[in-house]
């Protein structure tokens, strides 16, 4: 049903891929950041930009700092961005992630400081300073920062190699409303701007992430690694899974956001289709829906690689191997 998808390559195949992680941590965001920071041979993390989403901005920013310190990567630039969606009141998800957004492990308050620059300005300045098609954006939360940067500085668009985002759904429908996935629902107007930008987009939807379940066996392998990082990851997923197991009756929690980083590292773990994806911004019933033309029943121009499946065992083997590097 799916066709193999590949990651666009730029320049020397051995060259590190430059990325900016845009995030609203979130336990699964934290695991994604840790996966990226453990993959320094392949990925050059230029910065982590924070946005309001799972919890308000003041907490997502602190959480990003905590994760960098957990990884012993105080060199990473962390910046705070937009604290509200473009046109709507902020919807958060403490019911999933806990009051801090990072409930589960006990992590010390960070001693790292946020960069003084705003995240949107950082996105614009960084992209302007890089060669065309050289930076991949990895949004793990609502798309407010990315859309704001595009609106303020459309000249950055040619500098973006690709946007690989976690968001949306088709077969799995919604997880915050019957029709909408959380990240897109929080700021559908921002998502519409991004999907209309003309930049190459890869979508990692719930259809994929709900197949990447942290079972007890997989989580025990994290914990058995014995490092502070691995134990923290196990404690995060211990907390995180309670909501999804009760809601879906699944055997574990889906690790949504690390799938974005795994796609950059091992794209052959995933399959998908290049299709048209539109964002609903008007309907009360389907606000934030990713209207994915999976069956190609319209004549709308394809604008995104929409992933549909994952080799879950391969994904967890990759994640466990990288966590073992800490």
Image: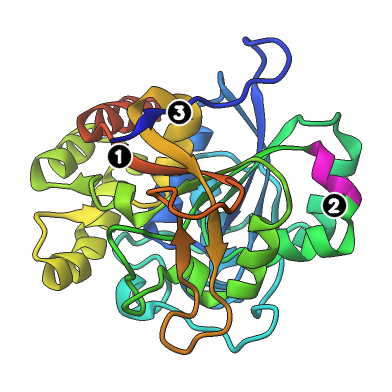
- Residue 296: x and y in percent read 44, 48
Q: Earlier in the sequence, mark 2 or mark 1?
A: 2
Q: Mark 3 = which residue? A: 5
Q: Which of the 4 image quarters holds residue 47? A: top right
Q: Is residue 240 above or below residue 235?
A: below
> Element at badge 1?
strand
Which residue is at the front of the view, 265 or 100? 265
Highlighted magenta segment, given as a residue range: 155-159
Few, some or many C-alpha atoms within 10 Å of disc 1 (few <14, some 14-19, many ≥20)? Answer: many
Nearest the eye: 223 or 112: 223
Q: Quadrant of the C terminus?
A: top left
Q: Nearer the viewer, mark 2 or mark 1?
A: 1
Disc 2 versus disc 1: distance between alpha carbons?
33 Å
- Marks 3/2: CA–CA distance: 29 Å
Residue at image x 16%, y 72%?
247
Q: Residue at x 56, y 45 (%)?
A: 304
Residue 311 in sight in this render: yes
- Marks 1 and 3, how far apart at CA: 11 Å
Nearer the camera: disc 3 or disc 2: 3
Position of the N terminus by quadrant: top left
The disc label shown at residue 152, or none: none
Marks 3 and 2 close (CB-CB < 8 Å): no
Q: Residue at x 50, y 85 (%)?
A: 283
Dot label at residue 124: 2
First in residue order: circle 3 vs circle 2: 3
Mark 2 surroundings within 10 Å by alpha-carbon count, few (fewer than 14), some (14 through 19), many (20 or more) = many
Q: Is residue 93 left or right of residue 84?
A: left
Residue that carries the numbered disc 1 in the rendered image: 309
């Amino acid at each position: 049903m799916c066709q193999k998808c590949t990651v666009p390559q730029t320049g020397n195949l051995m060259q590190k891929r430059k990325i900016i992680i845009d995030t609203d941590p979130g336990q699964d965001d934290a695991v994604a950041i840790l996966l990226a920071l453990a993959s320094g041979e392949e990925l050059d993390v230029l910065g982590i930009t924070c946005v309001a989403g799972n919890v308000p901005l003041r907490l997502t920013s602190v959480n990003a700092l905590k994760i960098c310190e957990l990884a012993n990567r105080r060199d990473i630039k962390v910046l705070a961005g937009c604290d509200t969606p473009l046109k709507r009141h902020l919807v958060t998800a403490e019911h999933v992630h806990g009051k801090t957004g990072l409930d589960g492990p006990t992590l010390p308050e960070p001693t790292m400081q946020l960069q003084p620059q705003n995240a949107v300005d950082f996105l614009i300045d960084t992209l302007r300073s890089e060669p065309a098609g050289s930076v991949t954006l990895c949004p793990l939360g609502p798309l407010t920062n990315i859309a704001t940067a595009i609106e303020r500085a459309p000249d950055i668009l040619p500098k973006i190699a690709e946007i690989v985002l976690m968001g949306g759904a088709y077969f799995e429908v919604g997880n915050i409303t019957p029709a909408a996935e959380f990240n897109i629902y929080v700021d559908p107007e921002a998502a519409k701007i991004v999907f209309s930008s003309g930049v190459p987009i890869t979508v990692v939807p719930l259809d994929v992430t709900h197949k990447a379940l942290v079972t007890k066996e997989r989580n025990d392998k994290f914990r058995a690694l014995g490092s502070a990082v691995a134990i923290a990851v196990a404690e995060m997923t211990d907390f995180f899974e309670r909501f999804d197991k009760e809601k879906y009756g699944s055997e574990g929690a889906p690790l949504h956001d690390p799938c974005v980083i795994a796609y950059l590292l091992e794209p052959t773990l995933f399959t998908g289709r290049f299709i048209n994806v539109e964002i609903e911004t008007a309907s009360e019933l389907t606000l934030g829906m990713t209207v994915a033309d999976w069956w190609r029943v319209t004549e709308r121009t394809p604008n995104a690689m929409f992933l549909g499946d994952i080799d879950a065992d391969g994904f967890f083997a990759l994640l466990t191997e990288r966590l073992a590097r800490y």
